[in-house]
């Protein structure tokens, strides 16, 4: 009934009896999985349930925006202190990332009408490398195509902070993009290398800038 609570206790061996290989590393054999459930509400119709779901999603979205804005302030303080400590002169982007140009490029600045090919190395603010397409140990040794357009058939985009930083570069440019966590992987983090609310640094080289037509031709040739 509404307001009721229930707790369950299940042996991990039982939960993963049919597929033991899928047991996560943090779960051990002979240990227990506990689940606590509380019935917050009961809806008599699908319409009532849908309306409540929409209201809940709207509330969560609003709350996430507030938390993201608060985190951006914290991240900005952390980054500006990092710049002062390491004598870095970085320019703030439109959304709140920062970029340090180490080698100017030529031609028009990157915008949302193009696809860019880059070399990159991603690090945490502490200097731990978590991804790179120039390091053989990371297993990805070809240029990364970054789609900045709204045509998803031309490839994938990247985290907001990276897109924001690339728009302050042009062909041939090299630089470092400093990304606050709220423009990166946020409170969720990513895998075991990027912690929740982790600020990131991407060393980037812009190899080429392609129009939509050029990018489509490039993809067709690759296929």
Image: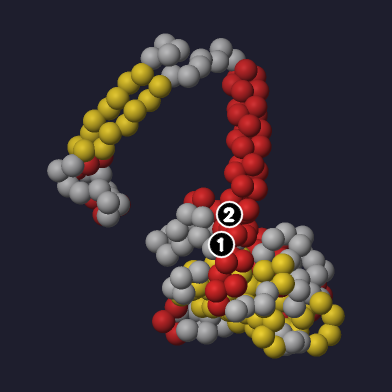
Quick one: label 2, few (<14), some, or many (20+) residues within 10 Å?
some
Tell me the residue that label 2 is attached to.
Answer: 74
Quick one: label 1, few (<14), some, or many (20+) residues within 10 Å?
some
Report the front residue among 90 and 25: 90
Residue 208 position, x and y percent, is 72, 84
Q: Which mark is residue 145?
A: none
Q: Give the SS element for disc 2.
A: helix
Name the quadrant containing residue 118.
bottom right
56 sits to left or right of 115: left
Q: Determine the residue positioned at 80% across, 70% down.
A: 111
Q: Determine the residue positioned at 50% across, 73% down.
A: 123
Residue 128 position, x and y percent, is 44, 73
Name the quadrant containing residue 146.
bottom right
Q: CA distance from mark 2 to mark 1?
A: 6 Å
Give the quadrant of the C terminus: bottom right
Q: Give the SS element for disc 1.
A: helix
Report the front residue among 189 and 45: 189
Residue 211 position, x and y percent, is 81, 76
Q: Determine the residue positioned at 48% across, 19% down.
A: 40
Is residue 154 visible in the rendered image? The answer is: no
The reply to whether discs 2 and 1 touch (Cβ–Cβ < 8 Å) is yes
Whether 105 is drawn above or below 131: the answer is below
Tell me the residue that label 1 is attached to.
Answer: 78
Residue 38 position, x and y percent, is 40, 22
């Amino acid at each position: 009934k509404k307001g009721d609570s229930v707790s369950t206790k299940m042996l991990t061996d039982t939960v993963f009896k049919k597929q033991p290989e899928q047991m996560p590393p943090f779960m051990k054999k002979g240990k227990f999985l506990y689940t606590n459930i509380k019935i917050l509400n009961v809806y008599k119709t699908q319409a009532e349930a849908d309306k409540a779901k929409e209201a809940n999603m709207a509330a969560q979205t609003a709350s996430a925006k507030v938390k993201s804005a608060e985190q951006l302030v914290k991240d900005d303080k952390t980054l500006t202190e990092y710049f002062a400590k390491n004598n870095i002169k970085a320019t703030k982007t439109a959304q709140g990332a920062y970029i340090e140009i180490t080698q100017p490029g030529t031609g028009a600045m990157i915008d949302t009408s193009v696809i860019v090919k880059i070399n990159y190395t991603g690090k945490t603010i502490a200097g731990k490398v978590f991804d790179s397409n120039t390091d053989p140990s990371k297993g990805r040794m070809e240029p990364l195509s970054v789609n900045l357009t709204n045509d998803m058939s031309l490839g994938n985009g990247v985290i907001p902070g990276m897109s924001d930083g690339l728009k302050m570069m042009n062909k041939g440019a090299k630089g470092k993009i400093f990304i606050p966590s709220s423009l990166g992987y946020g409170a969720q983090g990513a895998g075991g290398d990027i912690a929740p609310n982790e600020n990131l640094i991407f060393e980037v080289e812009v190899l080429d800038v392609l129009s939509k037509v050029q990018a489509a031709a490039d993809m067709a040739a690759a296929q």
